[in-house]
Image: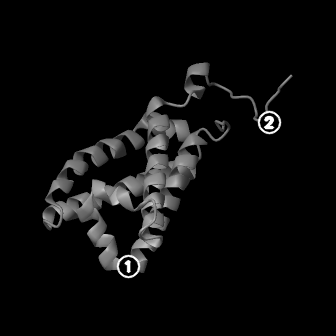
Amino acid sequence: MRTSGHPPLVGMNAQSQKRPFGIAALSMFFLLGSLISLTAAVSLLLPGSFLQPIWRLNPRGHEGPLRIGFWAMVLLFAASMSCGTAAVGLWRRARWGHILAIVLIGITLLSDLGNSVLRTAPRAIVGVPIALAILLYLMSRRVRNYFAQDAFEST
């Protein structure tokens, strides 16, 4: 008697059904990124609100969005939605979530590299090896296989 709505997994042992720690950690990372960018967007939408003190953590980071204006809020809301979607997709073991995570980390890698080369944010070079390591992990055979097994959807 089956109790779940999922078909039985043929050729898979119990260990291969578990969510890898790295995927769980990346899902939480994307969720945190979603919440941070949402908070930043709302703080720009409501200047002078109770959220305003968050910019004391990075006053220079506040200057850029203020110069951009309305589009900064749009970009932050888009980043929040993208990160949140990636978090859910990774957690649910959805192939699209895996692909979205690769795309988002790839964009981060390219932007960190560009900011470093153009010297607009020289310290962004620190993010390059981190993003590269995450990309290599996401594209590893083990992780690709984890997302390729369509018969199982982790909840």
| Colour scheme of the rendered structure | one colour
Quarter of image, res 148: top right
Q: Which residue lies furthest to the right in this view?
A: 1
> Which residue does the numbered mark 1 point to in the structure image?
69
Examine the rendering and report whether any part of residue 104 can be seen: yes
* Residue 38 screen position, x and y as percent: 48, 60
The residue under label 1 is which amino acid type? Gly
- Label 1, secondary structure: give it: loop
- Residue 120 versus residue 70: which sits nearer the camera? 70
- Residue 43 versus residue 132: which sits nearer the camera? 43
- Residue 54 versus residue 41: which sits nearer the camera? 54
Q: Residues within 10 Å of mark 2 (few under 14, many from 20)?
A: few
- Residue 28 versus residue 128: which sits nearer the camera? 28
* Residue 11 screen position, x and y as percent: 63, 24
Rendered residue at 64%/36% (across/down)? 154
Examine the rendering and report whether any part of residue 13 can be seen: no
Left/right placement of residue 11 relative to residue 90 reads right
Reply above or below: 8 against 107: above
> Which residue does the numbered mark 2 point to in the structure image?
5
Quarter holding the C terminus? top right
* Residue 77 screen position, x and y as percent: 49, 66
Nearest to the eye among marks 2 and 1: give it.
1
Pick whichever of labels 2 and 1 is earlier in the sequence.
Answer: 2
Left/right placement of residue 1 relative to residue 27 reads right
Q: How much space separates mark 2 and mark 1, taking CA atoms?
A: 48 Å
Rendered residue at 20%/48% (across/down)? 126
Quarter of image, res 49: bottom left
The residue under label 2 is which amino acid type? Gly
